[in-house]
Structure formats: C-alpha cells, structure tokens
Amino acid sequence: MMILDSVKTYNNFSLKEYTTLKIGGEAEIAYFPSSIEEMIAIRNHLNSKNKRITVIGAGSNLLISSDGISGGVILTGNLSSCEFLADNRIKAYSGLKSSRFAQLLYENSLSGLEFLIGIPGTIGGAVTMNSSAHGQAIEQVIESVEVLNLETGELLNLDKFELDLGYRYSFVESNRHLILSATFKLQKDHPEKIMEKMEFHLNWRKQKHPPLTQPNAGSTFRNPEEGVYVGRLFEKLGAKNWVEGGAKISDIHANFLINTGSATSTDVSRLMHKMYNAVKKNFGYDLIAEIRYVGDASEEEEKIWKSFQVH
C-alpha cells in the first residue's frame, strides 16, 4: 500500500479538461501515476475492490459520459519520459505526447515517425490505434511494447507481431491490455529533411482538419474500405449542416464532430447515430467508430452505442 500512498489521487474529479472534445463528468476516483510500479499498484488496488478501471491518455479520441465514470480512472500524463538506446532505438512511455515525441526525434536526427507531430494524442494511444498518415505508420518502426494485463495484473513484453497490428487496430485494446512503454527502431537522417516532413504533416492537418480551438475528437468513423473516404460520403449527404444540441459536424471536414461549447455526451451520441444510419441507408456501409465512449452511459446512449460497430 505504500506505493499507492505516493500516487496523486482525487475523488469526484472533473474530466472535462482531459479530453479534446471538452465533454465529460466526474471520475469517482482519479489517479495520476508517475511510474510503472505505481500503475501496477493502482490496478491491483482497484481489482481488489472490484472497481472498474478506465485509462485516459490525452483523451484525443474519447467521448466521456457527461454523467462521469464510476470506479477508478488512471490518467497517464505523468508517464511521459523516453530513453535513447543503442542502434537508433528509443523507448517511450505511454503518457508522452505524440507531438513532443516527434520533436525529440527531430532534435536527435531520427526519422520514421514525423507524422506524430500533428497528432494530439499520446504514445500509448498511437500504438493502441496503430496510428498512421501519408505512408508512415507505427507498425513500420515499432519493435516491442511493455503491457499490463488489466484483467490478470500480469506484466508482459510483446513484440510487434504479437500486437496483431492492423488498420486503426491492435491486440491490446480489445483484450484489456494497457501499454506502458513502446520501443521503436528508427533511422538517422538530416534534420532539414525531418523538419520538411514534419511541416508537411502539420500544414496538411491545418488545411484539412478543424483546429483543436474547436473542441473535437478527431475522425468520427473509420473509412469503410480502401479508396472510400467516409468524409466524402457525409458531404454527399449534406451532413455539414447537421446539429444535435451543442454538437455539430465540422464545416472543414465532415467526419469531424465539434463541441460548440455546451455539447453533452448524449448530443454527440445522437449525432453519431444519425451519421451512421444515413451512411448505412444511402451507401450500405456499416461504419466502425473511431471515437471511444467511456463512462456511465444513459439508457439512450447505451442503446445507441450498441447499434453501431466499435472495433
């Protein structure tokens, strides 16, 4: 219990500012671990109390219930260091911001993950979702991960093949494993070339995606198949005019939902349901949500989220 005593812990902690959508109620108990040992101690404590465990990184693809989250919420933001190893390898901990990691790689002339500069998430989230953009992907450079099995408490080292990486998918999320750290193998390159790639990714996102000054959770749904872009399907449906309470579809990209300032998790859920049903009716696709819902769902929200696919 002594390890747990050192963890920053808060009761009835507001989560609204810990998601890029700026939506969310209170965590029953919130923990801010600063080490893997603390992470394990929290997991063991919550498991012994039969409490639900929810993990939040940067909250960049999360819809948190406006009614909050029962049980324990682990926020990984203090696990944000990295270690430079031999042979252009680097170990990054799960709470390290993706953009900060990209900057550190640039400062050390390491190439392969320039696209992370524009992603408002953490390394844990990037690996869990096998993030990619414009020909670069996590799966191309990752070597291994250290994970915690939230069900059993077992600490495991998995190589890239055991992660079963696919399009916006990895083994860890669907099997209740939490990424603690990831080791990457990168390539040396000239800083000017690395910066050029980073600026390309940043400029592309500025042109194509709404800024985070308009609170959003990134892409709402996955593209249904190769060469079919779900944002274009929504544009054909005139979805950029759709509004539900305080939630609306972005004028910049039709696969992004915006919190106009007063949106609730129910507003977002209803708008996503409308989007999903419209595409299914008009184009025949069963879309898979990229946004993850966490927390104490209302009866209506539970029904909505059960009606469409979540990978």
Image: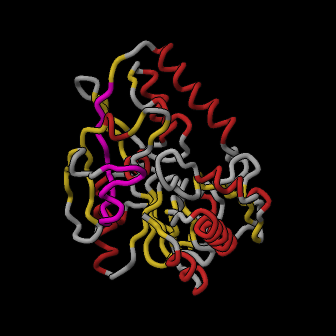
Does residue 35 lie above or below 263 as drawn? Answer: above
- Residue found at x 54% / y 81%: 302
- Residue found at x 28% / y 62%: 40
- In x, y percent, where is residue 183? 28, 38
- Residue found at x 34% / y 64%: 174
- What residue occupies the far bottom of the structure in this picture? 299
Q: Is the N terminus in the top left, top right, bottom left or bottom right quadrant?
A: bottom left
Q: Quick one: 31 or 85, which is closer to the camera? A: 85
- Residue found at x 66% / y 60%: 22
Q: Is the C terminus in the top left, top right, bottom left or bottom right quadrant?
A: bottom left
- In x, y percent, where is residue 44? 28, 70
Left or right placement of residue 156 versus residue 193 in this view: left
Left or right placement of residue 178 versus residue 13 in this view: left
Does residue 14 appear in the picture of this structure? no
Q: Quick one: 210 or 101, which is closer to the camera? A: 210
Which quadrant of the view contains residue 170? bottom left
Q: Quick one: 52 or 267, which is closer to the camera? A: 267
Q: Quick one: 61 or 94, which is closer to the camera? A: 61
Left or right placement of residue 140 versus residue 247 in this view: left
Q: Is residue 168 shown in magenta? A: yes
- In x, y percent, where is residue 189? 39, 15
Does residue 213 appear in the picture of this structure? yes
Q: Is residue 260 shown in magenta? A: no
- In x, y percent, where is residue 133? 49, 37
Query: What is the number of callouts on the image?
Result: 0
Does residue 71 lie above or below 187 as drawn? Answer: below
Does residue 189 lie above or below 33 as drawn? Answer: above
Q: Which residues are magenta?
A: 165-186
Instruction: Say how the picture is coloured.
Output: secondary structure
Left or right placement of residue 114 versus residue 213 in this view: left
Which quadrant of the view contains residue 209? top right
